[in-house]
Image (cartoon, rainbow, N blue to C red):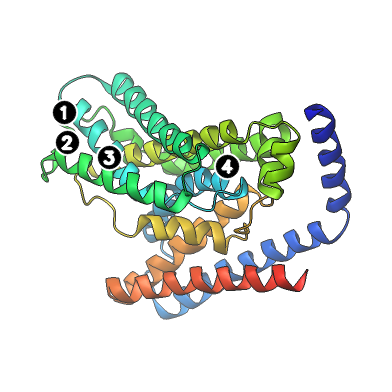
Amino acid sequence: MIAELLQRFAQTEELAADGPAIARRRRGFLFMGLGIAAVLVVGGLTTPSFLTLENLLVVIRAASITGIIALGMSYITISGNLFALSAEELAILAACIFAFLMRDGYGLAIALTATLIFAGASGAIQGGVMSLGGDPIITTLAFGALFRGLASLVSDNKNILLGTKAAEWLGTGRPLGVPTQSWAFVILTLVAWFVLQRTRFGRQLILIGANRLAAKASGLRVGQASIVALTLFGVCCGLAGVFAAAQFGLAVANLFSGLTIDVIAAVLVGGIPLRGGQGLPIQAALGAVFIALLQNFMLLHSFTTGERMFVIGSLVALATVGFHLLQKRRG
């Protein structure tokens, strides 16, 4: 029965792709492209250093950190579970664990593997709580506080220096002139697209997001899908934390500021609807590039932290209202 349902869903997607759905997706890519182009043009005209190679590399690195987590977040949003509000805290905790293990001489392979396993397990636990009926917002908010506390304990609110250059290539390396983080970002974007569009799990995730009750009635394991989605999200947070720790050569409990709202903005501004059941990972990736460019533009124009948060928060609010009005218009 499940196979039949998935086949029917795939046929529906193919039909939709020939109609309004593909047109909406193309408009979304067009608007996102215009937004990125607008920031580049305005930034280039108002700030001579904005379009320099060195500054663009800074933007690319920032977009990669935000984007890697946004890819993980896209699994959650597309599955109909809104957002995980623990992104920043889990990434910080992962960075602290990675730095702690590197400092104590465990080596890159063990430190990286242990960090990603821990981050994935942390995501899976959140997914397990949600599968038992826990509200996504409350659950991830609570776990975010827990992760923040653990990060403070691990770091003792002090800098944890890696103490070795073994991981330096992860943070500051430039294979073929492109930052290592950016290569990982591109590869993960392609992997995320393949998972959602070409695998049975991806089809199930989209179907669950489109109609959770129908998915349950047809026998799909909705709870299990949530656990897997949150696990992937956790791994992405862990990887982002590792890249950040390797880039700065240290980790501390306040390593990031405003990362969660940047990730949410990337997903929403990228065009993935809150209601779930639609969207592509590349939309979140493009959203991350736009947010990174905008943040960099504001920094170069001496925007305060509060002003930058206001702008990003406004984008999230506008995107949310826009999706609501669009859904209401479609009936």
CA gap between label 3 and label 4 equals: 24 Å
* Kind of residue at badge 1: Arg
Q: Is residue 90 left or right of residue 217?
A: left
CA gap between label 1 and label 3 equals: 15 Å
* Residue contact at pointers 3 and 2, CB within 8 angstroms: yes
* Kind of residue at badge 2: Val
Residue 322 numbered tag: none
Rendered position, 271 above or below 186: below
Q: What is the secondary structure assignment of the residue under circle 4?
A: helix
Residue 93 numbered tag: 3
* Kind of residue at badge 3: Leu
CA gap between label 4 and label 1 equals: 31 Å
Residue 154 numbered tag: 2
Residue at 78% in and 69% down: 330
Rendered position, 81 above or below 229: below
- The residue that disc 1 covers is 103
Where residue 181 appears, as percent x and y from the top left, is 42, 41
Q: What is the secondary structure assignment of the residue under circle 2?
A: helix
Q: Is residue 160 left or right of residue 243?
A: left
CA gap between label 2 and label 1 equals: 12 Å
Q: What is the secondary structure assignment of the residue under circle 1?
A: helix
Q: What is the secondary structure assignment of the residue under circle 3?
A: helix
For disc 1, the neighbor class at 10 Å (few under 14, some 14 to 19, many from 20) is some
CA gap between label 2 and label 4 equals: 31 Å
* Residue contact at pointers 1 and 3, CB within 8 angstroms: no
Which is nearer the eye, 182 or 111?
111
Where residue 172 appears, as percent x and y from the top left, is 32, 41
First in sequence, mark 3 or 2: give its number. 3
Q: Quadrant of residue 160?
A: top left
Q: Is residue 201 visible?
A: yes
Residue 189 numbered tag: 4
* Kind of residue at badge 4: Thr
